[in-house]
Amino acid sequence: MLFLRSWAYYLLTNQLGDVPLLLTPKREDNGIYYYPKSSIEDVYKRIIADMRFAYDNLPESQADRGRVTKWAAGHFLAKLYLNRAQAAGYQNGPQHLAMLYKGNVATDLDSVIYLTTEVINAMGGPGGLAPDYWTLFDPSVSETSPHKEVLWAAQFDVNTGLNGRFGGNRSCNYHTGDYTYQTGVTRAMAYGRPFGTYKPTDWAYDNFRDKVNDSRYYKTFQYEYISNMPGSSSTSYTWTDAAAAWWNANKPPEAPEAIAGEKRIKTGARALIYLENKKDEALDSAMVMSQPYQFMVRWIQSSKTGNYYYRVFIDGSSMGLATTRTAPYLSSKKFVDPMRGGSADEANFNSESGTRDAILMRLAETYLIRAEAYGRQGQYALAVDDINVLRQRAAYKGGENRPSVLVEWEPGAASLPAEEKVEPYTVTSNTFDAIRVTENHFTPGTPEAEAEGYIPTVTTKEDMFIHFIYNEMAREFLSEGITWEAQHNAGILYERTIYNNQMASPLTGLWDVATNTENGNGQDGNGKGQMQPHHTFRPWPNDYLSLLTDEKGNPLDEEARSQYQNPGY
């Protein structure tokens, strides 16, 4: 119970900062709603003390999946110590950083290292990580035999009646873009509901710096769809004269010829693929528009004019930047749920009730927490060792097959050995050396640091190290719901958002410019958002503020409510 209460306060303080610290139950409704806020420093003192007790008293294992263990408590307690250490120098800083101050305890980083080491050793060191990254999320594995890397997960069940008043795990509804538009693919349980709202930023795709050798990119995203339309369907895109002519002149020898007016995307064949390239890697427009499938390429270059176009459909129309919720985009596949609503029946695909367990803590994060603590102490070699444990798992292994889309279209695949470019694209040797991290990755002026693409405000080795940790977190945990809070507590959320998230940024001129800038929705190089430093904390809802009273039950006046509200709102 102390663990769960501390977890709740951790989530609340992440969003709101100072919050009421309520340690005794209110047993009657006496009309007095006097809930003065406690400082985040006092809240952390309490939840750290409670979590130390939990760590000392919880069992090392539980017969029931999902129950909290000593090692989940150790992971969480280490995270709390790290959060306090991260903000120790913010007390007199800018307001949005000063609000993060949780105290200044000299031993916090040592506590982080001690606890994470205990957890890592108890899990078997690197052997505590799932050997294959995808098996952590593959429902055929994760729902029957979850790996011990998962330290704590919220449990859901195919018996949806057990899921309580809030239903199942809704994450399955929010990550998948519309893969049905001009593709010959119809909604399917295997691909998820095409109603997504959580679209990764261009930076999130590009942050995978080596998509050829870091397997996490293609194991995170649904990069290919196969047509499941009936053969008689008329909704698949048809060959135009120009596309058919290009294809027939350039197609592989074994491929059938295209006939203008006939169905372009065949049932059971590739229907849609994605390529997240950069402007200097733009593909020829005639080639992209003349494939026997919908080819969603971020950047193409007109074969006639040389102009550059950003996110164009196979029919030449633009998707733009401010996409609708159903727009096609390269989607995270970590939450696809083939048992949505408790049934694999395709007729059940309207159900919003997911059955997948929700991973809340896993050992990979424990390694990065320890790595950050080492780096903050200047022990960079030890930090690099921990990061490389994750890189070893992320590498393609000898005998593993790369996806055909990678080998065919990724710019970096051109350098692969000839034998690895032949179907089934088998990797001949482990790719870890290609993605191994060294101190050069966060040392100013090195090629590795340049390739990491640090934001302009990050210039020192100390700062580069911190931002490298959060770049790596974004690669390892993309769409898992922990990186917003992690960057927030580290005090770097605002600057990373305005430089990396075009849709939230108020800055101008930071992004490549395309020809298709129609109606301000196209890629004109400017930010489209209004992010301000105070937005790193959330506002208190007015419905809550209007219910508050003083000690005698008198409603708070406007001035008192304004004082209670977070700055900037």
Image (cartoon, rainbow, N blue to C red):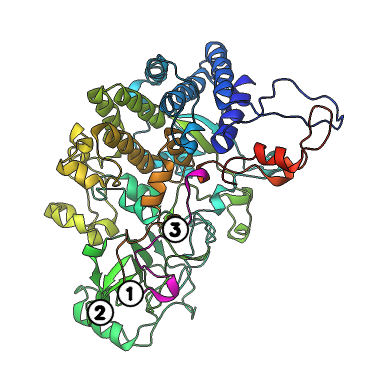
Reading the chain from its start, which is encountered first: label 2 or label 3? Answer: 2
- Which residue in the protein does label 1 denote? 292
Q: Is residue 178 left or right of residue 339?
A: left
- Name the residue beneath numbered marker 3: 503
Classified by dominant secondary structure, the portion drawn in magenta counts as: loop
Question: Taking 55 as reference, is 545 above or below it?
Answer: below
Residue 447, placed above or below residue 403: above
Residue that appears at 83% across and 34% down: 554
Residue 189 at x, y percent in the picture = 53, 57
Question: As shown in the figure, which amino acid type bears the numbered disc 1?
Answer: Pro
Q: Nearer the viewer, mark 3 or mark 1?
A: 3
Give the secondary structure at mark 1: loop
Magenta stretch in the rendered image: 515-534
Residue occupying the point 59% across, 23% down? 43
- Residue 532 belongs to the span the image colors magenta: yes
Residues at discs 1 and 2 in contact (Cβ within 8 Å) = yes
Mark 1, other Cα within 10 Å: few <14 / some 14–19 / many ≥20: many
Q: Earlier in the sequence, mark 1 or mark 2?
A: 2
Q: Amino acid at mark 2?
A: Trp
Residue 331 - label: none
